[in-house]
Image (cartoon, rainbow, N blue to C red):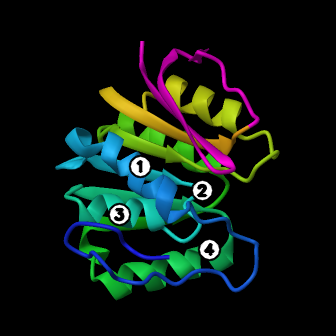
Amino acid sequence: MRVIAGKYKGRKLNSPEDSSVRPTTDKAKEALFSILTNEIYGARVLDLFAGTGGLGIEALSRGASYCLFADSSRKSLGLIKSNLEHCGVEEKTRVAAGDYAKILKNLARRIEDGLEEPFDIIFLDPPYDAGFMDEAFRLISEGGILAEDGIIVAEHRKHEELPEVLHGFEKAKERRYGVVKLSIYNNM
């Protein structure tokens, strides 16, 4: 696994030794960031279910101004922190440990209190078949976590169909890459 383009192009990222974390493939990541080219520069990014941090680091490499990495796994948090240090991007990031629902509820409170701004891009890559996607969309919507012109990128199995409209977000694009599908949503 590596950073594909931008300031940190070519840097190898630490990945798990087992299959406990499923990093986004380079092919899917390259295609995704080709789609997001005009959205990345200066963006505030939330990498939820971050795993290794590969998507958020790629966004930072391509000009995102800030990324919050969130995961509940201690192993993943260790990988994220080592990858951030390896790329030298700690000053543009924050790492949050905990359950995704608690993270999103906390972000909603921080945004409401003016301590945090909504995010321009949210990456959602939950464990497959865990049933987290719908609840994550609901909490993002209710908490005002996505900026008005922001986008959500949901990665899921290619056979899983996400609705055209999900908790106030509308599917704008959907692309399949191998065994995964990327569904991109905008505010309605």
- How many neighbours does mark 1 have within 10 angstroms: few (below 14), some (14-19), or many (20 or more)? some
- How many neighbours does mark 3 have within 10 angstroms: few (below 14), some (14-19), or many (20 or more)? many
User: In the structure shown, which secondary structural element does the residue marked by tag 3 occupy?
Assistant: helix
Instruction: Say whether disc 2 or disc 3 marks the residue closer to the N-terminus.
Output: 2
Mark 1 and 3 residues: CB-CB less than 8 Å, in contact?
Answer: no
Q: Marks 2/3: CA distance?
A: 15 Å
Q: Could you tell me if residue 64 is visible in this image? A: yes
* Residue that carries the numbered disc 2 in the rendered image: 49
**Which secondary structure class fits the magenta region best?**
strand
Residue 134 located left or right of residue 81? right
In the drawing, what numbered circle is on residue 31? 1
* Residue that carries the numbered disc 4 in the rendered image: 76
Instruction: Say whether disc 1 or disc 4 marks the residue closer to the N-terminus.
Output: 1
Q: Position of residue 54 (x, y in %)?
A: 46, 67
Instruction: Say whether disc 1 or disc 3 marks the residue closer to the N-terminus.
Output: 1
Identity of the residue drawn at 31% across and 76% down: 90
